[in-house]
Amino acid sequence: MDFTLPDEIEMLQKLVRNFVKKELMPLEHLVIENEANRGLDNSPLLPPEIEENLLRKTKELGLWGLDIPEEYGGTNLGFLAKAVVMEELSKTIVPFTLPPDAPNAHFLAACCTEQQKERYLLPYIRGEKRSAIAISEPNAGSDIGAMQTTAVKKGDKWVLNGTKIWISHADKADFIITMAVTDPEKRQRGGITAFLVDKNTPGLTISKGIPTISYQHPYELIYEDVELGESQVLGEVGQGFVPMANRLGVRRLELAQRSVGMSERLLEMMIEYANQRKTFGQYLADRQSIQWWIADAATDIHATRLMAYHAAWKMDQGAKDIRREAAMLKVFGTEMAQRVADQAIQMHGGMGLAKEMPLEFMYRYIRVIRILEGASEVHRWTIARDLLRNGIR
């Protein structure tokens, strides 16, 4: 058992850490100011010209498509490399991730036909197209089996009807991976199908944006007699649930690593402040309660990082099912980050609430990801159900 990161991943970690320090950290005040000033609209926190410049630099540095197979234009460094990178990127509040967005890329790579690869996957990986995925509905969030959006075969067309909600990036997407019920009796056991829906398809409406507690601005989508040809079916009819679940597993691993990155940044701020702030003639660093907060945060961060590295390693070894590990990571990582963020704000007092610091920005985002990609309570149920049915191993 060797816990040493391979040399190429250590080099990648240093490269991304330097990129974050030089390119992203200086943009934090701009992000804070833009979010505070935009109100309820969805104006970008990063101006398009700045985002384009960052994307150009990631290509120049070889940071594009780290976990994408070489045959599709990626560098194929694997999930462990992506986990390390995601941790470093999450130490800043600047909303920038290395393209392409991995979960949708893996969903497409697993299910696309050759024609679909040319039309969707490859342009997506090259950054020429953007995607979104539409799963959640007003009455079907974590309970995917309660999905009501239907796809009915009429002649040589599939006709979609329904409403999706909380769909991130829908306004910018060139196509939307849409999950729909094709067999109401079977549902997630052979009755849910994935479809590729182009943004200008007749009957598809991006109804409204939904301002949230965080910077994210998801959308409601309405499908009204949306007609799709057979070439728009992603994967096999009725077999969309498993690749969708695998896609969610990739995202949950990412969220755990985001939690590690944000928590480490918060811990660094706590340590710095504790060593310089005096109250009643004593440094905060000398108070036992503060020492315990710092010790517990460091311990939890270390535990989450090791869990995430192990899950990523399993995926790199070819593991097809990490649903239990992904659920554990989602719960443990996001709840850990919430504790650290809360204590960091408490330690900083009034300054912790001020928008000139990134503390409250991180706190609000962390509160969102405890629900995003499945609430903690649902994941605990998933873990327990798996253990009760299959045992520990």
Image (cartoon, rainbow, N blue to C red):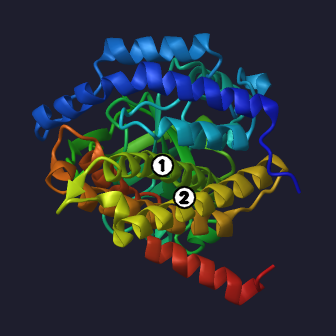
How far from the left and from the top, in percent, is residue 266? Answer: 39, 49
Q: Residue at x 45, y 19 (%)?
A: 22
Label 2 belongs to which residue?
Answer: 301
Q: Is residue 319 above or below residue 291?
A: above
Image spot of residue 317 (x, y percent) = 85, 50
Q: Is residue 344 above or below residue 316?
A: below
Question: Is residue 371 in view from this perspective?
Answer: no
Any mark on residue 66, and which?
none
Dot 2: within a 10 Å radius of its alpha carbon, few (fewer than 14), some, or many (20 or more) residues? many
Amino acid beneath label 2: Ile
- Position of the N terminus, as image quadrant, is bottom right
Q: Is residue 169 above or below residue 335?
A: above
| Residue at the farthest bottom position | 388
Give the residue displayed 70% in from the left and 43% down from the top.
Answer: 79
Question: In the shown orientation, is residue 291 left or right of residue 29?
Answer: right
- In percent of width and height, residue 49 lies at 33, 11
